[in-house]
Amino acid sequence: MKNFALLSAILILAFATIACSFSVNLPDIKTIETGPTVTTDIMVPLPDSSGTPKLEINFGAGELNIQPGAESGLAAGTATYNVPEFAPKIVQDGSTVKLQQGEGRIDGLPNFGNEMVMEWDLELSDTPMEMELNGGANQTRAELGGLSFVDMVINQGAADSEFSFSEPNLVEMSNMQVNAGAANVNLYGIGNANITDGFIFKGGAGNYTLDFSGELQQDLYVTIDAGLGNLILVVPDGTPAELTLEGALTNVNTTGSWQKSGNSYNTSGSGYMIYLDVTMGAGNLDLRN
């Protein structure tokens, strides 16, 4: 669980930096009380109500691993933890089923140390569903290919996250939105997500990689709004794309077949098109094939 110590150090350093520039009242550092390490099963059932079910995963701190494989319900897996207040809890609200870290709350700056254990290993079923993932200071690894998402929202805080669609989404997904804070976020195989209306990415200050490889089944419309940091966009060679950029303080690097014309960039090919509308505050934009 060395990632807990790293995330804690990042948070503490960030507040310390602010304190050197401004006069602020810093929150107290709270020590998390731990107990014996236990492993419990997780089984997220289908909701009782009719309509498309929604799975909401609320995972603040720890290591979250997601992959396909559940044979029934919405999700199944295990939780390993040593903070009793953060035992997994399932709450149903109409067609929404929430899987969350118990009743535990972290006020102020958490002192994770090397003693806290918090890991979920989840398998999702291929039942058509909406999904919302809300994460805080965590490490997330999620393989989402070959499932049946009709809508998806991902909210990540100070996280180190990797999401992948290695296989096509089995149904049309109307929208996919990713909101990332001061994070490292990598998304691979977005072309396999089968998005009909649009893909939206909003980033704060971090390092982001968006890879649009995969099997496009219609034109893909992408809106990206990033603050500070480094943004890598990968469009597979042979896939046509048009990109417009707003961001006077953005340094742009291109490799492969990308061509520049004014504040627009394009790469040629055949088949369905990817349209990218990018706004950046300041940082580096790296366009690749």
Image (spheres, rainbow, N blue to C red):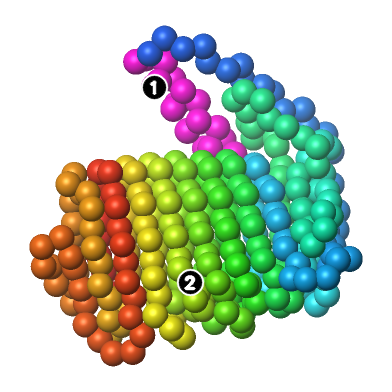
Marker disc for residue 262 = none
Residue 32, can we see it? yes
Marker disc for residue 197 = 2
Classify 10 Å Cα crowding around label 2: few (below 14), some (14-19), many (20 and above). some
- Residue 9 forms part of the magenta stretch: yes
Quarter assignment of residue 19: top left
- Residue 221 forms part of the magenta stretch: no
Marker disc for residue 17 = 1
Check disc 2 and report its element: helix, strand or loop: strand
Q: Nearer the viewer, mark 2 or mark 1?
A: 2
Gap between marks 2 and 1 measured at Cα: 41 Å
Report the magenta residues as a range.
1-21
Q: Who comes first in sequence, dot 2 or dot 1? A: 1
In the foreground, 37 or 98: 98
Residue 2, can we see it? no
Identify whether 106 is placed above or below 241: above
Q: For the residue marked with disc 1, what is the amino acid?
A: Thr
Check disc 1 and report its element: helix, strand or loop: helix
Which percent across, then down, holds residue 16?
A: 44, 20
Q: Residue furthest bottom?
A: 270
State the quadrant of the N terminus: top right
Which percent across, then down, holds residue 74?
A: 78, 68
Quarter assignment of residue 220: bottom left
Q: Residue furthest left?
A: 262
Which percent across, then down, holds residue 127?
A: 74, 76
Which percent across, then down, holds residue 246?
A: 23, 53
Q: Residue furthest right?
A: 48
